[in-house]
Image: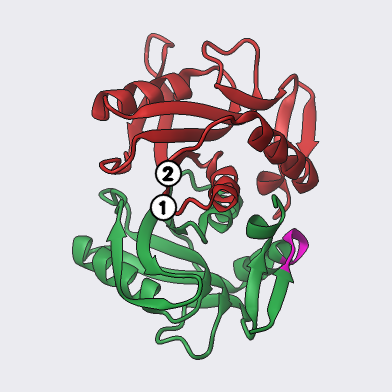
Chain colours: A red, B green
Amino acid sequence: MQHLYYPYEDFLTDAKRLTKKIDRKFDAIIAIARGGLSLAQFLGEYYGLRAVYSINTIGYNDTKKLETVEIFNIPELNDVKKVLIVDDIVDSGDTLIEVLKILKKAYPNVTFKTASLFYKKSAKIAPDWYAKEAKEWIDFFWTEDLK
Amino acid sequence: MQHLYYPYEDFLTDAKRLTKKIDRKFDAIIAIARGGLSLAQFLGEYYGLRAVYSINTIGYNDTKKLETVEIFNIPELNDVKKVLIVDDIVDSGDTLIEVLKILKKAYPNVTFKTASLFYKKSAKIAPDWYAKEAKEWIDFFWTEDLK
């Protein structure tokens, strides 16, 4: 698959684009770690939200070649009503589906919306907002620039 | 107080400097949110660590410091032995002291080390590793660039 290097400047453009698309306010942001961490920090600063949390996932293939996603470090959401979940890319969609399932089950009275920088049309779920469609493998600056 | 704009390029230089100083391996990284989130993502990628977590604190105000620091969203550390806690700046040191206290109490068998981009000499505690001494108020790129 072709690789696309994604520099900080493009991230900034796309994060701005996302803030133009996101048409409501939230009480908290949850980053899907690691991919969503930087975006969550930027959006937290942009919206003046100190409630920026993270959630962890492990994806692995079991013996039947089905991908399962384990979710852990679920943040406390006792005082919030509207939460924005962010990630760098919605690829297969498996992670986002499982994160939403777990969070909705744990917090049935919280409204969850989702945003990502990239989205693949072949994913099983679309984020509510995304900046760009991904057609290549993305080499993000946070992966490449420290090498 | 004088303000210093801190661009992405300087962050990258300082994160590289940190990786040169950090002289051991860790099983997990904990970002003190929000400030440490981007650095944690970069270091997680650099060290090939998927175990990048976050912890939340309340008690620091932009203009004045409150007496108490509340810590929440403590990550699960059941399978790890050595953890690197990261933040953008160790300013008064109050947050880092409280985070260390809570984490050491919850996980007495885990070794915690700390790293930050900036450190103020007047802080009550020094991180194990830091990139730069802070002499001004730092306007980080994640705060400024989306404005």
Going 26% across and 72% down the picture, which residue do you hit? B101
Write the start and end of the magenta stretch as one range: B6-10
Q: Is A147 situated left or right of A79 in this image?
A: right
Res B23 seen here: no
Q: Are marks 2 and 1 in contact (CB under 8 Å)?
A: yes
Q: Which mark is residue A54?
A: 2
Res B2 seen here: yes
Q: Secondary structure at mark 1?
A: strand
Query: Is B121 situated above or below A99?
Result: below
In this rendered view, identify the residue nearer to me: B43 or B93: B93
Q: Quadrant of the N terminus of chain B?
A: bottom right
Is disc 2 surrounded by few (<14), some (14 to 19) or many (20+) residues within 10 Å? Answer: many
Q: What amino acid type should be assigned to the residue bearing mark 1?
A: Ser
Question: Where in the figure is residue A138, as x and y percent of width and height?
Answer: 71, 31
Instruction: Using the rendered view, name the quadrant where residue A100 is placed.
Output: top left
The outermost residue toward the bottom is: B122
Is disc 1 surrounded by few (<14), some (14 to 19) or many (20+) residues within 10 Å? Answer: many
Residue wearing tag 1: B54
Question: Where in the figure is residue A134, as x and y percent of width and height?
Answer: 71, 22
The outermost residue toward the front is: A24
Question: Where in the figure is residue B114, as x and y percent of width and height?
Answer: 44, 71
How many numbered badges does the structure rendering display?
Answer: 2
- Chain letter belonging to callout 1: B
